[in-house]
Image (tube, rainbow, N blue to C red):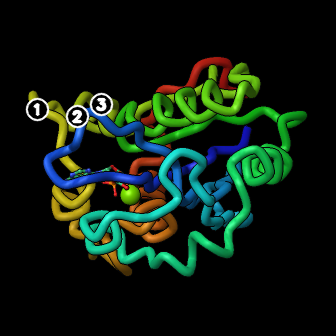
Amino acid sequence: MNYIILDLEATCWKDRDINKQNEIIEIGALKINNESNVESEFSEFIKPKLNPELSDFCKELTTIEQSDIDSAETYDIVISKFKEWIDLNQEFVLCSWGFYDKKQFAKDCDLHRLDKSWLTNHISLKHQYADIKSISKPLGMGGALKKEGLKLDGTHHRGIDDARNIAKIFKANFYDWKIKNKV
Ligand code: AMP
Ligand code: MG
């Protein structure tokens, strides 16, 4: 079983402008094996289709620059690289901090008319973490790192750094996650 610990960044606007559709601009992910070792990392920017110009708010939040996006490939291309990197022929489960990332993947797959079946095997570490620790309200990633006595490394709201930090929480509780069809 491979555990794909992932975090997405997406186009965004101040006050979460509901008239605009968010699109993924970064995928950060780590592949962790049955021995809880990191096998490899995936880190790619994506050029959005609907709003290729990043808002000042988004650039500030994520520290992603317009030039990162301008030189990036489109979602269809990056997602096919990502699926290849995951290796859909091996057993895998997608793990993210909450359900946001899975929903955002589904939205972008719809926008580009791409297959969504690979998203089925997914767990929210955020909700499972609350269960494991018997906390009534799920913690943000920062709160969970603090609870674990772990440092927030890198830049918060950068997909690859968020994924690395989530992976530390994942490894610290490796035997507690509930995975369907675990082999
Ligand atoms: P995160 O994984 O917490 O860095 O957030 C993922 C994405 O959610 C960001 O790239 C933004 O698109 C969106 N987001 C996060 N926080 C905010 C916020 N305070 N206001 C608007 N959008 C946000
Ligand atoms: Mg993030």
Q: Read off the residue under disc 2.
A: 130
Q: Nearer the viewer, mark 1 or mark 2?
A: 1
Asked if marks 3 and 1 touch (Cβ < 8 Å), the reply is no
Question: Which three-letter amino acid code belongs to the residue tagged 1?
Answer: Lys
* Quarter that holds the C terminus: top right
- SS at mark 2? helix
The circle drawn on residue 127 is 3
Q: Residue furthest right?
A: 89
Q: Secondary structure at mark 1?
A: loop
In the rendering, at what x and y percent does residue 147 appear? Answer: 17, 58
Q: Amino acid at mark 2?
A: Ala
Vertical order, 89 against 164 (above or below): above
Q: Is the CB of the residue bearing disc 2 within 8 angstroms of ligand 1?
A: no
Closest to the observer, 105 or 152: 105
Disc 3 packing (10 Å; few <14; some 14–19; many ≥20): some
Is 75 situated above or below 166?
above
Amino acid at pointer 3:
His
The Cα–Cα distance between marks 3 and 1, rounded to whole angstroms, is 9 Å
Q: Is residue 163 left or right of residue 153?
A: right
* 3 and 2 marks in contact (CB < 8 Å): yes
Residue at image x 31%, y 70%? 156
Whole-percent x and y of residue 49? 60, 48
